[in-house]
């Protein structure tokens, strides 16, 4: 993998190790490059809501994590300010879900990141878009 | 409390007992009536993200749970289809956050629920709006 | 009205006079103060969509204008970065609709503004939330 | 073009002829198939906001129209219930903007449609996602 991808991957793995919520979800980084991140996780019993399907908060959290990593992949702190999610099809225990974040735009102070969540058969599970405020602060080591 | 509120409270407590994600958050029901729910939780170390503030997924999940309970409080299953969240101010370990969901509109098939998250000093932490598709199915006992 | 409100009103009236889209909508400022704006308009035949109700784009545009004025009321340019709208109940020709924007939070660089659109009988028509990036540039005179 | 596309195109052209707001925008259908629509328009002086860039309401309206046509392309009335938009880069007078709506999911009662707006040089201008409630009513002829 190119130096840029390898560096990004190492930096983002480092960030997720500081994130207990990501560990609770069981999400892992499948791919990372500047502005682009793919995560996946296996949906477990404790991710279900009271109607017996995967909690919207779990789906949002996976997308939000991919968004957070993609927008923080350039080395300075980016803070989420607004996000939305459309829930497209239900997810059950044992499904593997994949979140792919890309960078639609990035200026000095603002960035926009669409995230698509799909499941193992390719079905779209949710569509998310997140916007960050970009700061000049670098991540603490 | 009026019969209607007492019944709603019992039904929603019952629903949340089936929801392991809500238990992981540590959210409790402070108030429940048809179409209106208030939840609160104490933010813990494991709710932090890699930038040291409360994870956006945790805030969304609290709001989404209040939204889910308010929209399911009428006795039939309502399914979240679209939601959004604006993050207004950061939250740290030890903060108590409160989510208040109300019903802006409800027709036979669609309902809209704004949720405001605030913290102990009254500051607005996040604004959420969720839309459900309302079905005719009753909740399993 | 207090000096602050009078000044804000004058500044925002000045801004809307530069905005041909607002004139096409027929929206007028009912109230303006720092961070808070109320607009109203009468829905006309040309605002209808192909299904015979008021176009979602018209409702969004009214809310977006209230949001734009409220967030630009502090004297420096604020740029909308993300917004969402939930459509709660239909609007027809002859209805008067009112958009009320308030300021949920404002920091040096980011501001969040919920807007509620209602109609003459008080029914909620739409809920909107908009987020701006705040710059240091002052509005050109 | 296949029969299905030709029929869809004719039906959607018919719908837009009933839509005075679309005519005011100056939007035309470049492509239409079941669940997929591409519109374009040229940005004019009267589409500007008070800060001198294209009004967010104009961008939203173009995306909302593509969303409305794509979701109503199957022959029954679909009603928008929730939408969001992230504004990615500014647009000026003379720019040609293109909105492409696709169908991410469609069930008996709910459909989700992402729309990307780009300009003539391919830059992403805005990302929109809209959700409809699908009814059984057919469009009046």
Image: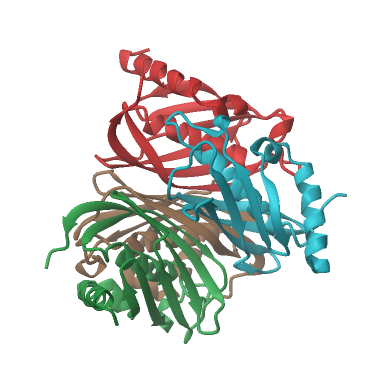
Chain colours: A green, B brown, C red, D cyan
Residue C31 visible in the current orientation: yes
Q: Nearer the viewer, residue B5 or C26?
A: C26
Q: Residue at x 40, y 34 (%)?
A: C102
Say if B108 sits above or below A67 in the image: above
Judge from the rendering whether residue C102 lies leftward or rightward of residue A50; answer left or right. left
Can you tell which quarter of the image residue B30 is in? Answer: bottom left
Q: Nearer the viewer, residue C123 or B38?
A: C123
Residue B2 visible in the current orientation: no
Judge from the rendering whether residue C49 lies leftward or rightward of residue C76; answer left or right. right
Q: Residue at x 35, y 23 (%)?
A: C140
Judge from the rendering whether residue A34 lies leftward or rightward of residue A82; answer left or right. left
State the residue lying farthest toward the left.
A141
| Quarter the C terminus of chain B occupies | bottom right
Q: Nearer the viewer, residue B84 or A119?
A: A119
Residue A127: x and y in percent read 50, 65
Q: Residue at x 70, y 58 (%)?
A: D31
Say if C7 sits above or below A19 in the image: above
Can you tell which quarter of the image residue C67 is in? Answer: top left
Say if B104 sits above or below B37 in the image: above
Residue D132: x and y in percent read 64, 57
Say if B31 sits above or below B122 in the image: below
State the residue lying farthest toward the right.
D141
Residue C9: x and y in percent read 41, 18
Residue D125: x and y in percent read 48, 50
Can you tell which quarter of the image residue C1 is in? Answer: top left
């Amino acid at each position: 993998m190119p130096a840029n991808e390898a560096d990004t991957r190492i930096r983002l793995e480092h960030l997720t190790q500081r994130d207990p919520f990501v560990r609770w979800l069981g999400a892992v980084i499948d791919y990372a490059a500047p502005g682009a991140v793919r995560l996946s996780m296996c949906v477990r019993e404790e991710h279900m809501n009271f109607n017996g399907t995967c909690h919207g908060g779990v789906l949002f959290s996976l997308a939000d994590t991919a968004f957070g990593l993609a927008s923080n992949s350039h080395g300075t702190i980016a803070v989420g300010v607004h996000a939305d999610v459309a829930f497209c099809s239900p997810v059950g225990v044992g499904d593997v879900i994949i979140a792919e974040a890309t960078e639609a735009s990035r200026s000095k102070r603002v960035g926009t990141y669409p995230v698509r969540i799909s499941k193992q058969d390719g079905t779209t599970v949710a569509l998310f878009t997140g916007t960050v405020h970009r700061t000049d602060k670098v991540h603490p080591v």
